[in-house]
Image (cartoon, rainbow, N blue to C red):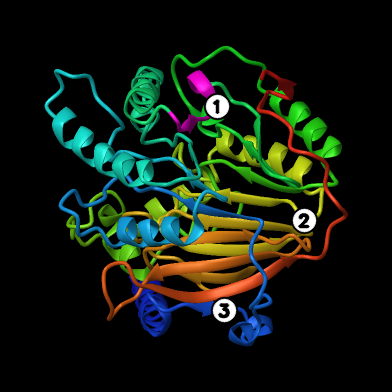
């Protein structure tokens, strides 16, 4: 009894300390000490970007009445950017389970949300690229491929100028030349963690093709996009709040305040060590992540952008740049510090501005808290890469490392 009482007391003290710590920084931008002067760093005021890319993930729960702050902010970005830009939607395009069949009771709500998103994208004069996430595959359930194909067909019908990549649920990689010297490579990371039917492919071959693409394009600035992050200080990276240790069911339903002290810590521990299918700790996710990092870390300067966790994060790791931009319609806890350069538990998205002189600037855009719906607040920016050599002429769309057009 004494041992149990001491353990309970120790756990209570630890949770109280964690809770107090979290209250000091939650929903406030965190910037690593080495980058606190970011406000004094900016691109040349006279420079015009060669190309701009907005990376926005997890917009599947946008408001449909015209009041959505992120969509209004995105529309302002579209107007400022013009045709020399690309919007990449990083998956989880429709909550909670993608696009159901026409007869499904949730179809009307899902279609209304998706149409609202597509209408905002249709106004853009540049390119639009959509990826799929685990929710688009019916949360990874065995019939998820049917949901994915249904959503892809809906995009082609409603917004035929958009790219839905990779096509048909294949793993990729697919490359798309965005501008002279700026290349996008898209991976369908859900393919590796999906259960049930999926397009037939060799699980290792996409990484060999990615390696080849990166070797052939070392003269370019390369952005790789996938739904699943490779680094994260949030839920899918095994980070939990003190509240989630006491009320573990709130990780599934935010209103499930069933107190389970001590026992409740087993769920966070399980997801940190073993992992649900959508967590980095899960064997399928872990294997995919390990293989992908093994390739990317050979090519310093490559940018990898993902969604999945509902916050904004930026990491510099082994010469690469890793983004988590999953705050398109929801927000969730993200832990400060560790190896993160920047994190914020807030709605928003990242803009990557590629300049003709070879500079690439990362900008963090969020709805301004006290201004109009379309006003932006830039809470962090950083120059990511040094000057690159002159780039070759634009090349066409390539699928799985092969030219198709």
Residue 29 shown left or right of residue 219 in the figure: left
Give the quarter of the image for residue 10: bottom left
Q: CA distance from mark 1 to mark 3?
A: 34 Å
Residues rendered magenta in the picture = 161-169
Residue 280 shown left or right of residue 3 in the figure: right
Residue at 33%, 62% (x, y): give it: 244
Q: CA distance from mark 2 to mark 3?
A: 21 Å
Give the quarter of the image for residue 47: bottom right
Question: In the image shown, does 146 or 118 lie closer to the viewer?
Answer: 118
Whether residue 262 appears in this view of the structure is no
Give residue 343's position: percent from left, percent from top: 51, 69
Q: CA distance from mark 1 to mark 2?
A: 23 Å
Residue 52 shown left or right of residue 121 in the figure: right
Mark 1, mark 3: which one is toward the viewer? 1
Estimate how packed mark 2 is, as few (under 14), some (14 to 19) or many (20 or more) residues with alpha carbons within 10 Å: many
Tag of residue 166: 1
**Residue tagged by mark 2?**
301
Question: In the image shown, does 258 or 159 lie closer to the viewer?
Answer: 159
Mark 2, mark 3: which one is toward the viewer? 2
Q: Earlier in the sequence, mark 1 or mark 3?
A: 3
Q: Earlier in the sequence, mark 1 or mark 2?
A: 1
Residue at 18%, 48% (x, y): give it: 64
Label 1 residue SS: loop
Give residue 262's position: percent from left, percent from top: 34, 62
Give residue 255's position: percent from left, percent from top: 17, 57
Q: Quadrant of the N terminus?
A: bottom left
| Tag 1 near tag 3, CB within 8 Å | no
Tag of residue 31: 3
Label 3 residue SS: strand
Q: Earlier in the sequence, mark 2 or mark 3?
A: 3
Would you place residue 85 above or below residue 242 in this image? above
């Amino acid at each position: 009894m004494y041992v149990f009482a001491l353990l309970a007391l120790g756990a209570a003290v630890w949770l109280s300390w964690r809770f107090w710590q979290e209250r000091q920084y939650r929903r406030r931008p965190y910037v690593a000490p080495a980058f606190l002067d970011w406000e004094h760093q900016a691109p040349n005021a006279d420079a015009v970007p060669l190309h701009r890319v907005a990376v926005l993930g997890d917009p599947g729960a946008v408001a449909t009445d015209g009041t959505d702050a992120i969509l209004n902010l995105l529309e302002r970005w579209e107007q400022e950017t013009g045709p020399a830009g690309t919007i990449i939607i990083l998956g989880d395009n429709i909550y909670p389970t993608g696009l159901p069949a026409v007869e499904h009771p949730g179809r009307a709500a899902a279609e209304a949300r998706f149409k609202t998103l597509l209408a905002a994208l249709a106004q853009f004069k540049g390119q639009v690229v959509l990826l799929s996430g685990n929710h688009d595959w019916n949360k990874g359930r065995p019939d998820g491929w049917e949901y994915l194909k249904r959503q892809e067909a809906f995009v082609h019908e409603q917004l035929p100028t958009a790219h839905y990549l990779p096509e048909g649920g294949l793993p990729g990689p697919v490359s798309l030349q965005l501008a002279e010297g700026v290349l996008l490579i898209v991976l369908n990371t859900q393919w590796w963690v999906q259960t049930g039917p999926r397009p037939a492919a060799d699980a290792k071959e996409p990484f060999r093709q990615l390696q080849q693409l990166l070797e052939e394009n070392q003269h370019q600035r390369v952005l790789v996009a996938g739904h699943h992050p490779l680094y994260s200080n949030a839920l899918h990276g095994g980070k939990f709040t003190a509240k989630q240790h006491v009320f573990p069911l709130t990780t599934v339903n935010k209103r499930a305040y069933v107190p389970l002290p001590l026992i409740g810590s087993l769920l966070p521990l399980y997801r940190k060590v073993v992992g649900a299918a959508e967590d980095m700790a899960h064997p399928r996710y872990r294997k995919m992540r390990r293989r992908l990092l093994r390739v990317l870390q050979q090519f310093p300067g490559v940018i990898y952008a993902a969604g999945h966790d509902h916050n904004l994060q930026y990491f510099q790791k082994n010469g690469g740049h890793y983004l988590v931009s999953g705050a398109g319609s929801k927000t969730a806890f993200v832990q400060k510090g560790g190896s993160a350069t920047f994190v914020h538990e807030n709605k928003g998205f990242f803009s990557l501005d590629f300049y003709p002189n070879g500079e690439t600037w990362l900008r963090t855009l969020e709805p301004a808290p006290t201004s109009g719906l379309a006003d932006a607040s830039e809470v962090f920016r950083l120059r990511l890469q040094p000057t690159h050599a002159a780039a070759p002429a634009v090349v066409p769309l390539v699928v799985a490392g092969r030219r198709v057009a």
